[in-house]
Structures are given as C-alpha cells and as structure tokens.
C-alpha cells in the first residue's frame, strides 16, 4: 500500500511482469545476439601490424649527433607512397596498393607506421614493414654519402684555392 502512495512499483509486481514477458525478452535478445555472433564468426580476423621508427642520425664534424631529416619529412615521404612501388615490385606483390598508416605521437621524435591485414597475411606484412625500413635506411645512407661527398669536394676546392694563391 505504501509503494502505491509513493508512486513506486512493488518489486514482486516487477518480477511478475518480467516472467510474463520472458518469451518476448528472450526473442528480442536472440534477434540481436544471434546475427551479431554469426557476423563476428564469419568476418575475417584483421590485425594491425606496426613499427616505430625515429629520424636517421649522423655525427657532425664537431662530434654532435644531428638528424638527417625531420619526422615531418619522413612522414610525408611514406604518406605520399614514395616507397610503395619499389616495395610492390621488389617483393612481387599481387596487391598493387599499400596504405601505410603513419602517425606521430604528440611532440615526439618517433613515427608509428602501421598496416592493417588479415591473419593469413601476417608473414608477408612483417616483410613489407621490414622492406620499408630497408628502403628508408638505403635512402638516408645515400643522403649521408652525398653530404660527405659535397663536403669533401668543398674541402678540396678550398685547399686547391689555397695552394694557388700568390703571397
């Protein structure tokens, strides 16, 4: 009687209503859970494969360590697909598109490079990421060698100029 005056519902009445409608509640539950379960079981398993890379470093003449390139430039090179064609052709991949997901943590000097693939493609995906790292290394080793040659040429020009000066 007190519950009726308070405007509340008696717990026994609530249980009675739920038990009366149990077939409806079970039907709604199965109508939602069954298709979701079937879809989940039939859909392919997709995984995110990733690696974290930093900018290439080189030692300067004064012994300090300097970045050969900025994180933004490396990200732009990967995002633009600069290495995709070389990776696809060298690895003889049937998939003609690679879409690397490149993200940079806030204020960090690292990049996270990811590929999303199915479990069956896990081995080849790891090889693709390794090949990207190899091409990046090769790219910057050429950059480093080019800088060394330019500096060497400048030194030779200065030295040859010093030898020719008349006193």
Image (cartoon, rainbow, N blue to C red):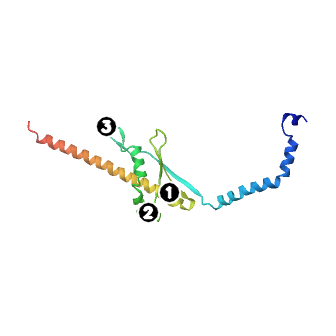
Q: Would you call the spot at circle 1 few (<14 residues within 10 Å), some (14-19), or many (20 or more)?
A: some
Q: Nearer the viewer, residue 157 or 101?
A: 101
Location of residue 69 in the rendering, given as x and y in whole percent from the top left corner: 37, 44
Q: Would you call the spot at circle 2 few (<14 residues within 10 Å), some (14-19), or many (20 or more)?
A: few
* Quadrant into which the N terminus falls: top right
How far apart in space, not on screen, are marks 2 and 3 (Cα)? Answer: 41 Å
Picture disc at residue 126: 1
Circle nearer the viewer, 2 or 3: 2
Count of all numbered marks drawn on residues in the image: 3
Location of residue 34 in the rendering, given as x and y in whole percent from the top left corner: 71, 58
Give me the residue at 57% from left, 57% from top: 46
How far apart in space, not on screen, are marks 3 and 1 (Cα)? Answer: 38 Å
Q: Which residue is mark 2?
A: 91
Q: Is residue 155 above or below residue 84?
A: above
Q: Is residue 37 left or right of residue 159?
A: right
Picture disc at residue 62: 3
Dot 1 falls on a residue whose secondary structure is helix
């Amino acid at each position: 009687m007190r519950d009726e005056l308070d405007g509340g519902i008696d717990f026994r009445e609530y249980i009675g209503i739920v038990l009366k409608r149990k077939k409806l509640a079970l039907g709604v539950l199965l109508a939602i859970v069954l298709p979701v379960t079937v879809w989940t079981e039939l859909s392919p398993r997709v995984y995110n494969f990733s690696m974290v890379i930093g900018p290439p470093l080189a030692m300067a003449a004064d012994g300090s360590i300097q970045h050969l390139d900025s994180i933004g430039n490396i990200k732009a090179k990967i995002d633009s697909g600069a290495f995709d064609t070389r990776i696809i052709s060298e690895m003889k991949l049937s998939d003609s598109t690679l879409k690397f997901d490149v993200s940079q943590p806030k204020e960090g000097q690292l990049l996270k490079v990811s590929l999303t693939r199915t479990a069956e493609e896990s081995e080849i995906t790891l090889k693709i990421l390794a090949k990207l790292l190899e091409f990046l290394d090769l790219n910057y080793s050429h950059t480093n060698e080019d800088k060394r040659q330019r500096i060497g040429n400048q030194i030779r020009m200065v030295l040859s100029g010093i030898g020719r000066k008349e006193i």
